[in-house]
């Protein structure tokens, strides 16, 4: 059986701006048709890495390929087979939906523009907005228009930089439905996001902080490798315990979720001892599953201490 080459295959990719190391010797592989999540705090290097992949930034060192083309020597070939959706809406707000798509199709030098634009609008549900100015669309529909522009030239790879930031939950779900349909057609997606529910939708994911890759794998693998333990605490006015627990040995993070506290740490014995000191007449606690959010907050806290 012939082994399929990765769509993204980079090794020790590095980019600096002055004394700031934006991406530090990053190595990842992304397979064809995969939805790969890219997570991390602001300033972690996600956007810089995405821009290096699509040829907008040149890496300082390292090696790698994207869509089978060398990142350093063949960036132009990568660009024509990649769809890039930036963090901010970057189409023309004073043009209509149809005019924006027609303009982008001409930029790509595509044939049969009228038919292509009609088909793309139909696929993304934009037909009823064809004559409306892009600037008058809601955030969710602007995002769908931007995605439509990315798909006009039928790219093999989508690089999506926080595409659902500021978009309502229904629009986010519709967006992800479309990404899954594209994955079924063989389109690979690299998606940066801050939303944990979106991270869990990805086939695999990577977590960056301060330019360093801290974790990678499926959501289940990342949680299992974290070594973190989480307990839930309930009771009347349980939120009042938060400040005290944060100062207790063995407790590394405390997060309120409504009338429940999530208490986490890496040392299960110390964590258990901390909770044993609670007034059992007022509070109840039990071990629970570690969430992806627990893991990422822990990674961010520990890496911040290192810096």
Image (cartoon, rainbow, N blue to C red):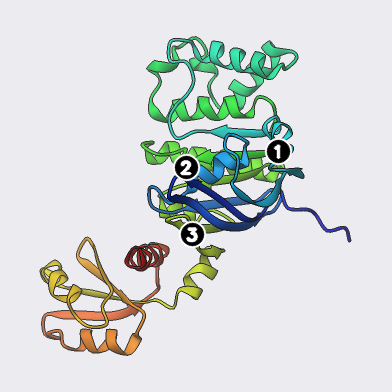
Disc marking residue 173:
2
Q: Position of residue 29 (x, y in %)?
A: 66, 56
The spot of residue 233 in percent (x, y) is 23, 75
Determine the image quadrant of residue 287.
bottom left
Quadrant of the rendered image containing residue 99: top right
Task: Say left or right for 79 vs 100.
Answer: right
Q: Residue furthest front?
A: 18
Residue found at the far right of this picture = 1
Q: Are marks 3 and 2 in contact (CB under 8 Å)?
A: no
Provide the residue designation for mark 3: 212
Position of 161 relative to 246 (above/below): above
The residue carrying pointer 2 sits among few (fewer than 14), some (14 to 19) or many (20 or more) residues within 10 Å by Cα, namely some
Q: CA distance from mark 3 to mark 2?
A: 30 Å
Q: Earlier in the sequence, mark 1 or mark 2?
A: 1
Could you tell me if residue 67 is visible in this image? no
Residue 228 in picture, x, y percent from top left: 40, 76
Residue receiving disc 1: 156
Closer to the camera, 90 or 126? 90
Left or right: residue 256 compared with residue 27: left
* Cα separation between marks 3 and 1: 27 Å
Which SS class for mark 3?
strand
User: Which tag, 3 or 1, sits closer to the chain's start?
Assistant: 1
For the residues carrying marks 3 and 2, which lies nearer the camera in this image? 3
Q: Is residue 10 above or below residue 156?
A: below
Spatial CA span between label 1 and label 2 = 22 Å
Residue drawn at x 71%, y 33% as measured from the top left: 81
Label 3 neighbourhood size at 10 Å, few (<14), some (14-19), many (20+)?
many
Circle on res. 127: none
Residue 291 x, y percent position in the rendering: 40, 67
């Amino acid at each position: 059986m012939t082994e399929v080459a990765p769509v993204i295959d980079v090794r020790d990719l590095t980019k600096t701006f002055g004394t700031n190391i934006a991406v530090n010797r990053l190595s990842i592989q992304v397979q064809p048709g995969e939805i790969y999540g890219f997570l991390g705090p602001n300033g972690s290097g996600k956007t810089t890495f995405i821009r290096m992949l699509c040829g907008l930034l040149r890496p300082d060192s390292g090696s790698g390929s994207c869509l089978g083309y060398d990142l350093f020597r063949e960036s132009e070939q990568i660009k024509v087979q990649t769809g890039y959706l930036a963090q901010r809406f970057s189409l023309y707000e004073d043009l209509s939906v149809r005019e924006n798509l027609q303009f982008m199709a001409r930029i790509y030098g595509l044939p049969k523009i009228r038919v292509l634009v009609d088909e793309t609008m139909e696929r993304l549900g934009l037909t009823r907005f064809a004559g409306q100015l892009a600037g008058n669309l809601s955030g969710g529909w602007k995002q769908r228009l931007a995605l439509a522009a990315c798909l006009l030239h039928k790219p093999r790879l989508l690089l999506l930089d926080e595409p659902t930031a500021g978009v309502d939950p229904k629009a986010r779900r519709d967006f992800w439905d479309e990404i899954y349909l594209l994955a079924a057609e063989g389109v690979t997606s690299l998606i940066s996001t801050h939303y944990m529910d979106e991270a869990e939708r990805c086939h695999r994911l990577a977590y960056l902080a301060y330019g360093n890759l801290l974790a990678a794998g499926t959501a289940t693998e990342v949680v299992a490798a974290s070594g973190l333990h989480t307990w839930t605490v309930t009771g009347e006015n349980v939120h009042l315990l938060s400040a005290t627990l944060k100062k207790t040995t063995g407790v590394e993070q405390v997060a309120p979720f409504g009338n429940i506290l999530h208490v986490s740490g890496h040392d299960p014995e110390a964590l258990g001892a901390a909770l044993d000191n609670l007034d059992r007449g007022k509070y109840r606690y039990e071990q629970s599953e570690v969430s992806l959010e627990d893991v990422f907050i822990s990674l961010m806290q520990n890496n911040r201490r290192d810096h």
